[in-house]
Structures are given as structure tokens and as C-alpha cells.
């Protein structure tokens, strides 16, 4: 019975430690946001999404973004292609290249 209580105490201590680490992380994140002058409500997750979206908008290969974010599946990373719309304007149609090769009369 004493062994069971010891295990409970270890679980409580581990949970407490996780809580403190998370709280310290949030404190550091909020301090960095204040220091940089970010006035909007922001979370580490929104910062991660913004980072990934900007990478895709700048033409970074999706496999690179996948590796940086630690995604197992490329489908998860492909969500950022829907968020990044600027790359659509840069797509060249194959028909445009045909227009350049037409003989002039």
C-alpha cells in the first residue's frame, strides 16, 4: 500500500513539473511579445501557423516546411498551401508559353 502512495506522489510531482515548465514557457512567450510590441492576442500556435504560412508564401518546398514543423504526413503540411494565396498569382499557365512560340505572320 505504501508503494502505491509513493507512485501517486511521483505522478503528482511529475504533473506539477509539467505545469511549471508550461507556465514558464508561457511567461517567456508573453514577455517576448511585449518586448517586440505585438499588441494582438497571440499564442505559440498562431505564431507557428504564421511562420509556416510565410515560408510557403516565399516558395519554401513543402517537404522542408514539413520537416521544420515535425509533421508526419505531408497532408498536414499541405493545409498551409490553402492559407497562402500569394503563390497563386505567380503560377504561369502552360498555355502562356505556347503563346510565345506561335509563328508570327
Image: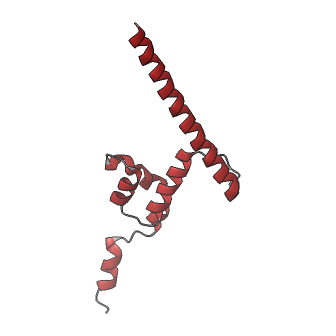
Q: Is residue 59 above or below residue 45?
A: below
Residue placed most toward the observer, 63 or 19: 19
The residue shown at (33%, 73%) is: 95
**Number of labelled discs?**
0
The residue positioned 45% from the left and 23% from the top of the image is 10
Residue sitting nearer the eye, 23 or 6: 6
Residue 14 in the image: state x and y as whole percent.
47, 28
Of 95 and 35, nearer the camera is 35
User: Image quadrant of residue 98?
Assistant: bottom left
Residue at the extreme bottom = 105
Q: Position of residue 61 (x, y in %)?
A: 36, 63
Determine which quarter of the picture holds residue 11. Answer: top left
Q: How is the image coloured?
A: secondary structure
Identity of the residue furthest to the front in this view: 2
Position of residue 28 measured from the top left corner of the image (x, y, whole percent): 62, 47
Q: Position of residue 59 (x, y in %)?
A: 42, 66
- Quarter of the image where the C terminus is located: bottom left
Residue depicted at x 36% and y 70%: 93
13 vs 105, left or right, is right
In the image, taking residue 95 as reference, residue 35 lies left or right, namely right
At horizontal 37% and vertical 49% (from top left) the residue drawn is 70
Q: Quadrant of the N terminus?
A: top left
Q: Is residue 11 above or below residue 27?
A: above
Amino acid at each position: 500500500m505504501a508503494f502505491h502512495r509513493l507512485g501517486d506522489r511521483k505522478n503528482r510531482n511529475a504533473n506539477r513539473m509539467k505545469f511549471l515548465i508550461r507556465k514558464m514557457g508561457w511567461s517567456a512567450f508573453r514577455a517576448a511579445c511585449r518586448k517586440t510590441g505585438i499588441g494582438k492576442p497571440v499564442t505559440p500556435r498562431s505564431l507557428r501557423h504564421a511562420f509556416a504560412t510565410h515560408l510557403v508564401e516565399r516558395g519554401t518546398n513543402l517537404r522542408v516546411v514539413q520537416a521544420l514543423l515535425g509533421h508526419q504526413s505531408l497532408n498536414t503540411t499541405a493545409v498551409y498551401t490553402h492559407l497562402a494565396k500569394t503563390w497563386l498569382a505567380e503560377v504561369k499557365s502552360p498555355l502562356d508559353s505556347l503563346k510565345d512560340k506561335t509563328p508570327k505572320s
